[in-house]
Amino acid sequence: MTTLTGKTIAVLATDGFEQSELTEPKRRLEEMGAKVEVISLKGKDSIRGWDQKDWGDSVKVDKQLDQAKPSDYDALVLPGGVINPDTLRRESSALDFIKAVAADDKPVAAICHGPWLLAETGLAKGRKLTSWSSLKTDLSNAGSTWEDREVVVDGNIITSRNPDDIPAFSKAIAEALAN
């Protein structure tokens, strides 16, 4: 099993994240020894998930975005859910954080609707990506080549389609950090 002891991973999210797409990768990465911090927008002490068809559980926010430094993290995870990335893509501070992590060639991993943030930041351009199938056109219009696979790794960008892909998604993040 891959060991991630000494690695710190940021999960950037806000209300409306798909519950399993935040909690499961977080749990799996922590089991491998990583420290995983949930980062959210100013004024958020906790954020509420979306659990398939209704509101789910709340998750504690470890750090507010205005207090987080990209240099403190070894990787970034962007969970999906429709509401979460749609809210974050309108926040310049969130986009700047994502771009800063990517600029340091650190892994940026997005699942389901999370790749909307890659399109919004310009990180989708020239990349092979996957996502929830309804984002195929959005990502193609952003300059990426969309593939229907459980996980796609293109340089430091890791993407997956949906909650069924979480095991492969988490494994790809761990492998990127181990290398």
Image: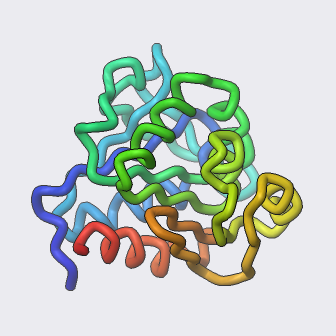
In the rendering, at what x and y percent does residue 65 appear? 41, 25
In the rendering, at what x and y percent does residue 124 appear? 66, 56
Residue 68's place in the image compared with 22, above or below, is: above
Who's the residue at 43% across and 40% down the image?
59
Asked whether the viewer can see residue 81, the reply is: no
Asked whether the viewer can see residue 178, the reply is: yes
Hey, which residue is sitting farthest top in the picture? 43
Who's the residue at 40% across and 44% down the image?
101
Q: Nearer the viewer, residue 17 or 50?
A: 17
Residue 26's place in the image compared with 86, above or below, is: below
Residue 136, located in which quarter of the rendered image? bottom right
Who's the residue at 44% across and 63% down the image?
156
How many callouts does the rendering have?
A: 0
Who's the residue at 52% across and 50% down the image?
78
Side of 155 where 122 appears, left or right: right
Q: Quadrant of the N terminus?
A: bottom left
In the rendering, at what x and y percent does residue 108 appear? 46, 55
Side of 179 where 41 appears, left or right: right
